[in-house]
Image (spheres, rainbow, N blue to C red):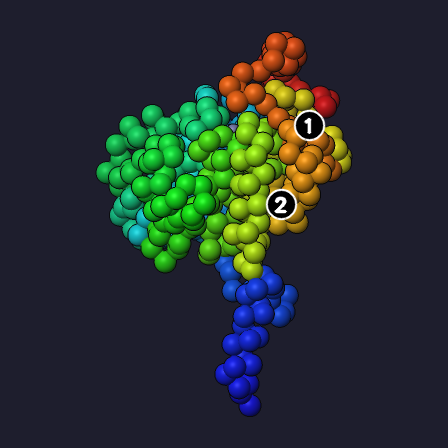
Amino acid sequence: MKLPLAAALLALAATLCHAQIPEPDGGPIRSGTLPLTWQTGGPKCMEVPEWTIHEYNPDLYILRQSGCTDYEKPFIFLFFGKDKAMLLDTGSRNGDLVPTLERTIHNWLTRNNRASIPLIVVHTHPHSDHVAGDAAVQAMNDPAIPVTFVPPTVADSQKFFHIEHWPEDYGQVDLGGRVIDAIAIPGHSPVSIAFYDRQTAILFSGDSLYPGRLYVADFAAFQASTERMIKFTEGKLVAHVIGNHIEQTRTAYLDYPIGTMYQPNEHQLEMTRGDLLELEVGLLSLHGVSARLALADMTIWPVPVSGIMRQETKEHFDARQKEQKEHMWDQTGAH
Ligand SMILES: [Zn+2]
Ligand SMILES: [Zn+2]
Protein backbone atom coordinates (compact mmCIF):
# COMPACT_ATOMS: atom_id res chain seq x y z
CA MET A 1 0.00 0.00 0.00
CA LYS A 2 1.26 3.45 -0.89
CA LEU A 3 1.22 6.47 1.35
CA PRO A 4 -0.90 9.31 0.05
CA LEU A 5 1.33 11.75 -1.82
CA ALA A 6 0.86 14.59 0.66
CA ALA A 7 1.87 12.37 3.57
CA ALA A 8 4.87 11.11 1.64
CA LEU A 9 5.95 14.67 0.85
CA LEU A 10 5.45 15.66 4.46
CA ALA A 11 7.58 12.73 5.61
CA LEU A 12 10.26 13.71 3.10
CA ALA A 13 10.14 17.35 4.22
CA ALA A 14 10.44 16.28 7.86
CA THR A 15 13.44 14.12 6.96
CA LEU A 16 15.12 16.96 5.09
CA CYS A 17 14.35 19.56 7.76
CA HIS A 18 15.97 17.65 10.56
CA ALA A 19 18.96 16.21 8.74
CA GLN A 20 17.81 12.80 9.81
CA ILE A 21 17.13 9.51 8.10
CA PRO A 22 14.55 7.00 9.31
CA GLU A 23 16.96 4.11 9.69
CA PRO A 24 20.65 3.94 10.66
CA ASP A 25 21.49 2.39 7.30
CA GLY A 26 24.12 4.80 6.01
CA GLY A 27 21.57 7.03 4.32
CA PRO A 28 21.58 8.43 0.80
CA ILE A 29 25.24 9.47 0.89
CA ARG A 30 28.43 7.85 -0.28
CA SER A 31 30.28 6.38 2.66
CA GLY A 32 33.97 6.13 3.38
CA THR A 33 36.38 5.37 6.16
CA LEU A 34 38.76 7.42 8.25
CA PRO A 35 41.80 6.03 10.06
CA LEU A 36 41.84 5.81 13.85
CA THR A 37 45.21 7.54 13.88
CA TRP A 38 47.36 9.37 11.33
CA GLN A 39 51.06 9.41 10.83
CA THR A 40 52.25 12.69 12.33
CA GLY A 41 56.00 13.27 12.19
CA GLY A 42 57.92 10.40 13.65
CA PRO A 43 59.00 8.80 15.83
CA LYS A 44 61.77 8.26 13.27
CA CYS A 45 61.74 10.82 10.47
CA MET A 46 63.87 8.57 8.25
CA GLU A 47 60.85 6.24 8.05
CA VAL A 48 58.13 8.81 7.38
CA PRO A 49 57.05 9.67 3.80
CA GLU A 50 56.48 13.34 2.93
CA TRP A 51 52.77 12.64 2.45
CA THR A 52 50.43 9.99 3.85
CA ILE A 53 47.62 9.15 1.42
CA HIS A 54 44.34 7.94 2.85
CA GLU A 55 41.58 6.60 0.59
CA TYR A 56 38.31 7.74 2.18
CA ASN A 57 36.61 6.04 -0.75
CA PRO A 58 37.77 5.48 -4.35
CA ASP A 59 36.89 9.07 -5.33
CA LEU A 60 38.06 11.00 -2.27
CA TYR A 61 41.61 11.03 -0.93
CA ILE A 62 42.87 12.78 2.18
CA LEU A 63 46.58 13.55 2.14
CA ARG A 64 48.55 14.62 5.15
CA GLN A 65 51.93 16.30 5.05
CA SER A 66 54.48 14.84 7.42
CA GLY A 67 55.48 16.79 10.51
CA CYS A 68 59.07 15.87 9.64
CA THR A 69 58.85 18.27 6.68
CA ASP A 70 56.93 20.98 8.52
CA TYR A 71 55.34 21.10 11.97
CA GLU A 72 52.07 22.41 10.50
CA LYS A 73 51.46 18.95 8.93
CA PRO A 74 48.31 20.10 7.13
CA PHE A 75 45.67 17.91 5.50
CA ILE A 76 44.74 18.45 1.86
CA PHE A 77 41.94 16.84 -0.14
CA LEU A 78 41.56 15.35 -3.61
CA PHE A 79 38.07 14.81 -5.07
CA PHE A 80 37.15 13.05 -8.29
CA GLY A 81 33.96 13.68 -10.27
CA LYS A 82 33.04 12.27 -13.67
CA ASP A 83 34.54 15.23 -15.56
CA LYS A 84 37.03 16.89 -13.24
CA ALA A 85 39.19 16.38 -10.20
CA MET A 86 39.60 19.02 -7.50
CA LEU A 87 42.53 19.58 -5.17
CA LEU A 88 41.73 21.53 -2.01
CA ASP A 89 44.98 23.20 -0.82
CA THR A 90 48.57 22.42 -1.75
CA GLY A 91 50.25 22.05 1.64
CA SER A 92 52.96 23.77 3.63
CA ARG A 93 56.64 24.49 3.00
CA ASN A 94 58.98 21.61 2.10
CA GLY A 95 56.00 19.49 1.10
CA ASP A 96 57.19 18.50 -2.40
CA LEU A 97 53.57 17.61 -3.23
CA VAL A 98 53.76 17.16 -7.01
CA PRO A 99 55.26 13.62 -7.20
CA THR A 100 52.65 12.29 -4.72
CA LEU A 101 49.83 14.20 -6.42
CA GLU A 102 50.74 12.99 -9.90
CA ARG A 103 51.11 9.39 -8.75
CA THR A 104 47.73 9.47 -6.97
CA ILE A 105 45.93 10.93 -9.99
CA HIS A 106 47.66 8.54 -12.41
CA ASN A 107 46.69 5.60 -10.20
CA TRP A 108 43.08 6.85 -10.25
CA LEU A 109 43.21 7.16 -14.06
CA THR A 110 44.53 3.60 -14.38
CA ARG A 111 41.93 2.28 -11.97
CA ASN A 112 39.16 4.02 -13.93
CA ASN A 113 40.50 3.23 -17.43
CA ARG A 114 40.89 6.89 -18.20
CA ALA A 115 43.63 8.70 -20.09
CA SER A 116 43.31 12.12 -18.51
CA ILE A 117 41.30 14.33 -16.17
CA PRO A 118 41.38 18.12 -15.71
CA LEU A 119 42.38 19.24 -12.21
CA ILE A 120 40.95 22.29 -10.48
CA VAL A 121 43.13 23.70 -7.69
CA VAL A 122 41.28 25.64 -4.98
CA HIS A 123 41.99 26.63 -1.39
CA THR A 124 40.44 26.79 2.05
CA HIS A 125 42.35 30.08 2.55
CA PRO A 126 45.64 31.67 1.47
CA HIS A 127 47.84 31.13 4.57
CA SER A 128 51.34 29.92 3.77
CA ASP A 129 50.79 26.45 5.27
CA HIS A 130 48.07 25.72 2.68
CA VAL A 131 49.39 27.32 -0.51
CA ALA A 132 53.11 26.46 -0.44
CA GLY A 133 52.73 23.94 -3.26
CA ASP A 134 50.82 26.34 -5.56
CA ALA A 135 53.70 27.27 -7.87
CA ALA A 136 54.83 23.66 -8.28
CA VAL A 137 51.30 22.39 -9.01
CA GLN A 138 50.77 25.17 -11.58
CA ALA A 139 54.08 24.22 -13.22
CA MET A 140 53.23 20.49 -13.31
CA ASN A 141 52.80 20.37 -17.08
CA ASP A 142 51.44 16.82 -17.16
CA PRO A 143 49.38 16.29 -20.36
CA ALA A 144 47.13 13.82 -18.52
CA ILE A 145 46.32 16.42 -15.83
CA PRO A 146 45.59 19.91 -17.26
CA VAL A 147 45.42 22.33 -14.32
CA THR A 148 42.96 25.16 -13.71
CA PHE A 149 44.28 27.26 -10.85
CA VAL A 150 41.93 29.44 -8.82
CA PRO A 151 43.91 32.09 -6.91
CA PRO A 152 42.79 32.37 -3.27
CA THR A 153 41.38 35.89 -3.45
CA VAL A 154 37.84 37.07 -2.78
CA ALA A 155 37.39 38.26 -6.39
CA ASP A 156 38.69 35.04 -7.98
CA SER A 157 36.68 32.87 -5.56
CA GLN A 158 33.49 34.84 -6.25
CA LYS A 159 34.00 34.47 -9.98
CA PHE A 160 34.90 30.78 -9.97
CA PHE A 161 32.29 29.55 -7.48
CA HIS A 162 29.59 32.02 -8.63
CA ILE A 163 29.23 33.73 -5.25
CA GLU A 164 27.32 36.90 -6.07
CA HIS A 165 27.44 38.61 -2.67
CA TRP A 166 30.46 37.84 -0.47
CA PRO A 167 30.21 36.42 2.14
CA GLU A 168 26.42 35.96 2.39
CA ASP A 169 25.75 33.93 -0.75
CA TYR A 170 26.72 30.32 -1.31
CA GLY A 171 28.59 29.22 -4.41
CA GLN A 172 29.36 25.86 -5.94
CA VAL A 173 31.44 23.88 -8.38
CA ASP A 174 30.31 20.78 -10.32
CA LEU A 175 32.97 18.13 -10.95
CA GLY A 176 30.54 16.06 -13.07
CA GLY A 177 27.84 14.31 -11.03
CA ARG A 178 29.42 15.77 -7.92
CA VAL A 179 28.46 19.23 -6.74
CA ILE A 180 30.57 20.81 -4.04
CA ASP A 181 29.17 23.88 -2.28
CA ALA A 182 31.43 26.80 -1.34
CA ILE A 183 30.52 28.78 1.78
CA ALA A 184 32.48 31.97 2.45
CA ILE A 185 33.64 31.97 6.09
CA PRO A 186 35.95 34.97 6.63
CA GLY A 187 37.29 35.46 10.16
CA HIS A 188 40.33 33.20 10.42
CA SER A 189 41.42 34.83 7.18
CA PRO A 190 39.53 37.29 4.96
CA VAL A 191 39.35 34.67 2.17
CA SER A 192 38.39 31.53 4.15
CA ILE A 193 35.95 29.19 2.40
CA ALA A 194 34.27 26.02 3.69
CA PHE A 195 33.27 23.30 1.24
CA TYR A 196 30.34 20.88 1.50
CA ASP A 197 30.65 17.76 -0.61
CA ARG A 198 27.08 16.66 -1.31
CA GLN A 199 28.25 13.16 -2.31
CA THR A 200 29.85 12.27 1.02
CA ALA A 201 28.08 14.90 3.18
CA ILE A 202 31.43 16.05 4.55
CA LEU A 203 31.90 19.70 5.48
CA PHE A 204 35.51 20.81 4.98
CA SER A 205 36.07 23.63 7.43
CA GLY A 206 39.70 24.61 6.77
CA ASP A 207 41.35 26.36 9.72
CA SER A 208 38.00 27.63 11.01
CA LEU A 209 37.05 24.40 12.83
CA TYR A 210 39.41 21.56 13.69
CA PRO A 211 40.66 19.90 16.87
CA GLY A 212 43.13 22.58 17.90
CA ARG A 213 43.68 26.32 18.13
CA LEU A 214 41.15 28.23 16.06
CA TYR A 215 43.07 31.41 15.33
CA VAL A 216 40.59 34.25 15.05
CA ALA A 217 41.77 37.40 13.26
CA ASP A 218 38.35 39.08 12.92
CA PHE A 219 36.08 38.06 15.78
CA ALA A 220 32.80 39.47 14.43
CA ALA A 221 33.39 37.93 11.01
CA PHE A 222 34.41 34.58 12.55
CA GLN A 223 31.24 34.47 14.64
CA ALA A 224 29.07 35.35 11.63
CA SER A 225 30.86 32.67 9.58
CA THR A 226 30.26 30.04 12.26
CA GLU A 227 26.58 30.96 12.12
CA ARG A 228 26.72 30.73 8.32
CA MET A 229 28.11 27.17 8.45
CA ILE A 230 25.40 26.19 10.95
CA LYS A 231 22.68 27.72 8.78
CA PHE A 232 24.04 26.14 5.63
CA THR A 233 24.12 22.65 7.16
CA GLU A 234 20.71 22.94 8.80
CA GLY A 235 18.49 20.27 7.29
CA LYS A 236 21.44 18.59 5.57
CA LEU A 237 23.20 15.38 6.49
CA VAL A 238 26.69 16.00 7.87
CA ALA A 239 28.79 12.85 7.99
CA HIS A 240 31.89 14.62 9.30
CA VAL A 241 33.34 18.08 9.70
CA ILE A 242 36.96 17.90 8.61
CA GLY A 243 39.49 20.69 9.05
CA ASN A 244 43.10 21.26 8.08
CA HIS A 245 45.10 20.45 11.22
CA ILE A 246 45.18 18.44 14.44
CA GLU A 247 46.76 20.26 17.39
CA GLN A 248 44.72 18.75 20.20
CA THR A 249 45.82 15.72 22.19
CA ARG A 250 43.42 12.91 23.09
CA THR A 251 43.15 14.51 26.53
CA ALA A 252 40.30 17.00 26.82
CA TYR A 253 41.34 20.67 27.08
CA LEU A 254 44.96 19.83 26.25
CA ASP A 255 46.75 20.81 23.05
CA TYR A 256 50.27 20.19 21.79
CA PRO A 257 52.49 23.27 21.98
CA ILE A 258 52.83 25.22 18.74
CA GLY A 259 55.63 23.79 16.61
CA THR A 260 55.19 20.15 17.68
CA MET A 261 56.32 17.72 14.99
CA TYR A 262 55.50 14.35 16.49
CA GLN A 263 52.08 13.90 18.11
CA PRO A 264 51.69 10.23 19.01
CA ASN A 265 48.48 10.72 20.99
CA GLU A 266 46.70 13.23 18.84
CA HIS A 267 42.94 13.78 18.67
CA GLN A 268 41.04 12.28 15.75
CA LEU A 269 40.75 14.52 12.70
CA GLU A 270 37.00 14.35 12.18
CA MET A 271 34.55 16.48 14.11
CA THR A 272 30.77 16.76 13.90
CA ARG A 273 28.07 19.36 13.45
CA GLY A 274 27.75 19.13 17.23
CA ASP A 275 31.25 20.60 17.52
CA LEU A 276 30.13 23.46 15.29
CA LEU A 277 27.26 24.09 17.70
CA GLU A 278 29.66 23.92 20.66
CA LEU A 279 31.85 26.50 18.95
CA GLU A 280 28.79 28.71 18.45
CA VAL A 281 27.92 28.51 22.17
CA GLY A 282 31.55 29.29 23.08
CA LEU A 283 31.58 32.34 20.82
CA LEU A 284 28.22 33.54 22.16
CA SER A 285 29.51 33.25 25.74
CA LEU A 286 32.17 35.87 24.93
CA HIS A 287 29.44 38.51 24.21
CA GLY A 288 31.30 40.06 21.31
CA VAL A 289 34.60 40.39 23.18
CA SER A 290 37.44 38.61 21.44
CA ALA A 291 39.14 36.45 24.09
CA ARG A 292 40.83 33.08 24.42
CA LEU A 293 38.46 30.29 25.41
CA ALA A 294 39.38 26.61 25.70
CA LEU A 295 36.63 24.11 24.88
CA ALA A 296 37.13 20.36 25.33
CA ASP A 297 38.40 19.71 21.79
CA MET A 298 39.29 23.15 20.45
CA THR A 299 40.29 26.63 21.60
CA ILE A 300 39.03 29.99 20.38
CA TRP A 301 42.32 31.87 20.02
CA PRO A 302 42.34 35.54 18.99
CA VAL A 303 45.39 36.68 17.01
CA PRO A 304 46.38 40.05 15.58
CA VAL A 305 45.00 40.65 12.07
CA SER A 306 48.61 41.03 10.91
CA GLY A 307 49.22 37.36 11.77
CA ILE A 308 52.55 38.34 13.33
CA MET A 309 53.40 36.36 16.47
CA ARG A 310 53.99 38.19 19.73
CA GLN A 311 57.66 38.28 20.72
CA GLU A 312 57.16 35.94 23.68
CA THR A 313 55.24 33.41 21.54
CA LYS A 314 57.92 33.63 18.86
CA GLU A 315 60.67 32.84 21.38
CA HIS A 316 58.77 29.79 22.67
CA PHE A 317 58.11 28.69 19.12
CA ASP A 318 61.74 29.05 18.00
CA ALA A 319 63.00 27.13 21.04
CA ARG A 320 60.46 24.35 20.40
CA GLN A 321 61.42 24.12 16.73
CA LYS A 322 65.13 23.87 17.57
CA GLU A 323 64.52 21.16 20.16
CA GLN A 324 62.24 19.20 17.81
CA LYS A 325 64.70 19.28 14.92
CA GLU A 326 67.53 18.07 17.12
CA HIS A 327 65.52 14.96 17.98
CA MET A 328 63.73 14.31 14.69
CA TRP A 329 65.69 11.19 13.73
CA ASP A 330 64.70 9.42 16.90
CA GLN A 331 61.81 10.75 18.94
CA THR A 332 61.11 7.41 20.59
CA GLY A 333 59.87 8.21 24.05
CA ALA A 334 59.00 11.80 23.12
CA HIS A 335 55.69 13.21 24.29
ZN1 LIG B 1 45.27 29.45 8.46
ZN1 LIG C 1 46.71 26.32 8.80
Q: Which residue is mark 2?
A: 276
Query: What kind of element bears circle 2?
Result: helix
Which of the marked residues, 2 or 1, is nearer the chain's N terminus? 2
Figure quadrant of residue 309: top right
* Badge 1 amino acid: Arg
When the figure is inspected, residue 283 is found, relative to residue 41, above or below; the finding is below
Figure quadrant of residue 158: top left
When the figure is inspected, residue 139 is found, relative to residue 183, above or below; the finding is above
When the figure is inspected, residue 123 is found, relative to residue 229, above or below; the finding is above
Residue 41 at x, y percent in the picture: 59, 26
When the figure is inspected, residue 94 is found, relative to residue 288, above or below; the finding is above
Residue 328 at x, y percent in the picture: 61, 17
Instruction: Please tell me the numbered disc located at residue 156.
Output: none
Query: What kind of element bears circle 1?
Result: loop
Can the viewer see residue 155?
Answer: yes
Quadrant into which the N terminus falls: bottom right
Residue neighbourhood size for the residue with mark 1, other residues' Cα within 10 Å, grouped as few (<14), some (14–19), many (≥20): some
> Is 123 positioned to the left or the right of 159 in the image?
right
Cα gap from disc 2 to disc 1, whole angstroms: 17 Å
> Is 157 positioned to the left or the right of 37 in the image?
left
Q: Which residue is mark 1?
A: 292
User: What residue occupies the far left of the structure in this picture?
Assistant: 143
Q: For the point 53% across and 86% down, which residue is it?
A: 4
> Is 49 positioned to the left or the right of 310 in the image?
left
Q: Nearer the viewer, residue 330 or 139?
A: 139
Q: For the point 46% across and 56% down, which residue is it?
A: 199
Dots 2 and 1: beta carbons under 8 Å? Answer: no
Can the viewer see residue 106?
Answer: no
* Badge 2 amino acid: Leu
Q: For the point 64% across and 65% down, which residue is it?
A: 24
Residue 49 at x, y percent in the picture: 51, 29
